[in-house]
Image (spheres, rainbow, N blue to C red):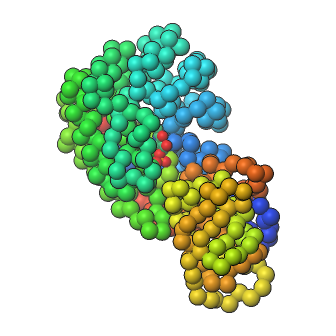
Amino acid sequence: MQRFPSAVEAVACRRPELPLACLRPHAATRAAQYFVDRFPGKSLYAVKANPDPIILDALWAGGIRAFDVASLNEVMLVGERFPGAHMAFMHPVKSRHAIRRAYFDYGIRDFSLDSEAELEKILAVTDNATDLGLFVRIAVDNSDALLSLSRKFGVDGAEAVSLLQRVRHRAARLGICFHVGSQSMHPQAWVRALQRVQQLILRAGVVADVIDVGGGFPARYPGLEPPSMDQYFDAIERMCEEVLPITYTCDVWAEPGRALVAEAATVLTRVELRKGDTLYLNEGTYGALFDAGGPGFVYPARRIRVEGPNEPTGMMPFRLYGPTCDSIDAMAGPFWLPQDTDEGDYIEFDMLGAYGMALRTGFNGFMTEAPVIVEDEPAMSLYTAPRRHTARPARLIGS
Ligand SMILES: Cc1ncc(COP(=O)(O)O)c(C=O)c1O
């Protein structure tokens, strides 16, 4: 894979005709080290955020040894790249074929579920295995998150209590998992979720072996400045110590996606036309800029000009359109760029390592170039001063 000191050099050398993803494996490694050292438990990387093998290798180099997988393709990708790595199949709805392959061919023992039907399916497909880790996904408040994940999965109330009791009888390890929503802007979200977990454990009268606090850990974006990652970790650790029952031991897991890889890619796009304050780009919401559409993410953007006058001008707000024929391929921003930005200029969008690359489609025939590696630093970082020597051991609640 081609390597450049920065995206600017990549533009100068390649003048890419199509959108070009520039990977920063060092940023993924740094974030992984941070989680491995400081999260008060075990971190499983949520592969969906970015399954690129370069990124997976970078996370492995940073110490990630466990993976949250959600599809058979993710199982195969991780299973073949890192034989023996711990994988947990954390999609609450799986096909029988995927469960069978995961259990028998890839040695997966941990599965999530949020219904009796899925429990029966897992048991039937694994021939009533007695070595399963079964994780009940509970529904929790997602109101601190930019992207809610609460509507589709999760049980609560009496249904959750009875499912916990049934699963306890059938599981070698009972896990409880939840997701507070992606890009969760306040540690309080985990405090509320863990209080809910505690209530359900007490009502069900079960002993849990693992509490999986899910993903949702944020990255930095313009206008979205979260507290430090340590504040999230401290809140989770405090809750696990103070609120969860302490009469037994319980492992703590997390499934970070965005927080591990957001800083690990930037995408170079080109302006194909300007109309007033609107730029038509060769990349949009059917590509790496998916979350700049409906969810309204504003990524750090900078203009890179390779030809023509390049004196500094004032900045102005632009809105953007992507290349497809679909009018929802629009990004309101506003994105602040030099006033004279025009056709032929490149625009680098940073912080696109999480979900940006993963959500690209070839809709309308708009494809991308093969990625390259860049060595510069992300526009915004939560980990610029990794503290490798302040390691906390993985904790056991109540131990
Ligand atoms: C079950 C599960 N775990 C983890 C994640 C990763 O979430 P995030 O990228 O917000 O950390 C997701 C994202 O959809 C998920 O569905």
Residue 353 appears at what percent x and percent y?
58, 55
- Tell whether 213 sits left or right of 118: left
Q: Is residue 161 above or below residue 141?
A: above
Q: Measuring 74% from the left and 88% from the top, which residue is drawn there?
A: 309
Q: Quadrant of residue 324?
A: bottom right
Seen in the picture, residue 224 relative to 203 is either above or below; the reply is below
Evaluate whether residue 385 shows in this view: no
Who is closer to the viewer here, 137 or 14? 137
Q: Position of residue 73 (x, y in %)?
A: 64, 33
Question: Which residue is located at x 46 percent, y 58 percent?
Answer: 219
Q: Nearer the viewer, residue 303 or 46?
A: 303
Vertical placement of residue 348 versus 196, above or below: below
Residue 17, x across and y down, in percent:
80, 64
Residue 244 or residue 181, whichever sits in front: 181
| Residue placed furthest toward the front | 327
**Image quadrant for the N terminus?**
bottom right
- Left or right of 251 on screen, residue 300: right
Q: Which residue is found at the position 73% from the left and 69% from the top?
A: 270
Does any portion of residue 195 appear in the rendered image?
Answer: yes
Quadrant showing the C terminus = top left
Total marks placed: 0
- Of 195 and 319, the residue lying toward us: 319
Residue 47 lies left or right of residue 149; in this view the side is right
The quadrant in which residue 172 appears is top left
Position of residue 201 measured from the top left corner of the image (x, y, whole percent):
24, 29
Q: Is residue 151 above or below residue 329?
A: above
Q: Residue furthest top?
A: 127
Q: Give the residue displayed 33% in from the left and 56% down from the top.
A: 186
